[in-house]
Amino acid sequence: MNFDFSEDQKALQAEARRFLVANCPIERVRAVLDDPTTTFDATLWRAVGEQGWLGAAISESHGGLGLGHLELCGLAYELGRALAPIPFASTAYILAEALELAGDDAQKARLLPQIAEGKLIGALATAEGPGAVDASRLQTEVREGRLWGEKAPVTDGDIADVALVLALEDGRPGVFLADLNGQGVERTLLRTLDPTRDAAKLVFAGAPAERLGPSGWGEGLLAGILDRAAVLVAFEQCGGADRCLEMARDYALDRYAFGRVIGSYQALKHKLADIFVKNELARSNAYYGAWALNAQASELPIAASAARIAATEAYWHASKENIHAHGGVGFTWEVDCHLFYRRSRQLGLWLGAPRLWKQRLTNHLELGEPA
C-alpha cells in the first residue's frame, strides 16, 4: 500500500511552501510575538483565505475547493513549517470538520461558506481549568437554548467568531455552537507560552447556543472531532519538527569550533540522527492517520492517537535539540529556536496531553474499549 502523496498533492504542497516563504517569513511571526496589541497576523489570514486553503476539504457546494483531507494535510505541514501565526487549525481542523461531521444542512449552509472565504474564525472550548476534560466534572451547561459557565483556556478564543463548546444539557454532555460576538459572552486574554497562538477565558452568561448533532451525543462527537484534528495537527507538528532539524543541521555545518565545523563532531551527529529518527517515525504515523482520515476507515481512532503521540514527541524533541545544537546562543531571543519550542509545547497540549492520547490508544489496542 502506498501512503505517499500523489504528484498533484505534492505540487499543491510545493506551491504552498513558495507562498509561505514569500508571505510568512520568520519576521512576520516575530512581529506578532513582539506586538502586545495583536495575537495573529490578520494580513496573512486574509491572504490564506484568498488562496482557498481554508476550504480545501470543504465541498464545492458550500464554497470550498472540494479537494479532500490529503490536500489539507499537505497544507498543514507547510503551515507548521512556517510557524504561521494564524488560527487556521482552530477554524479548518476543528470548526469546519465538526460541521462536516455533525452539522445539519442549515448549519453547514450558514457557516461553511464563511469559513472557506476566511470570514469566520473558530475555536474549541472544552477545558474548564487545569486537568483533563472530563464530562463528569463539567460545570458549563445549556438551559433553554442559553449557555452558562466558563471555559479556559480557549485557544484563539480572543479572536474567534464561533466556538464549539462542550456543555451539559439535561445532565448529558453535548457540543454547542456559540456566537462569540453576540450578547452574553465575555472574553479575557490569557498569557501563554506562545503568544502567536492566543488563548482566552470565555464567560457565558445566557449566550444563545445551538446544539451540534443529536442530543446526548457530546462525548462521541467530541472524540470524532479530536481524532480528525489530531491527524491534521500531527502534520503541522511534523512540519515544525523537520524545520528544526534543518535549522540544527545548517548551523552545525556553518559554525566552527577548534578549527572544524561542529557538525563533524560525533556527539552532534548523534543528536541530529536522533531527531531524524523521531521525525521519520512521526511522519509514518501521520501518513497512516491521513489515509484513515481520508478513507473514513474504522482504524481512524487508533491511527489518530498514534499520529498524535509520535508527532508531539518528535516536535518537542526536535525543538529542544535544535536549541542545544545552537549552543550558547540557542536560547537567546535573537535566535529563532525558541519560536519553534514555544509552538511545539502549545500544539502538544492543545488537543490534550500525550498521556491522555496514550490512554486512548491503550483502550483501543488492549482493552477493546472506546477511546
Image (cartoon, rainbow, N blue to C red):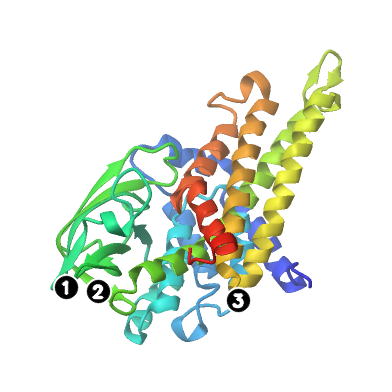
In the drawing, what numbered circle is on residue 210? 2
Residue carrying label 1: 145
Indicate the amino acid at tag 1. Gly
Indicate the amino acid at tag 3. Ala
Residue carrying label 3: 297
Kindly indicate the quadrant of the structure image that contains residue 91: bottom left
Q: For numbered disc 3, what is the local secondary structure? A: loop
Q: For numbered disc 1, what is the local secondary structure? A: loop
In the rendered structure, the answer to whether residue 25 lies left or right of residue 109 reads right
Per the model, the C-alpha gap separating discs 3 and 1 is 35 Å
Any part of residue 79 in sight = no
Task: Of the two numbered discs 3 and 1 on the same chain, state the one appearing first in sequence.
Answer: 1
Compared with residue 258, is residue 229 higher up or lower down, i.e. above or below? below
Task: Of the two numbered discs 1 and 2 on the same chain, state the one appearing first in sequence.
Answer: 1
Kindly indicate the quadrant of the structure image that contains residue 27: top right
Per the model, the C-alpha gap separating discs 1 and 2 is 7 Å
> Mark 1 and 2 residues: CB-CB less than 8 Å, in contact?
yes
Any part of residue 362 in sight = yes
**Which residue is at a point 70% across and 61% down the rendered structure image?**
14
Q: Residues within 10 Å of mark 3 (few under 14, many from 20)?
A: few
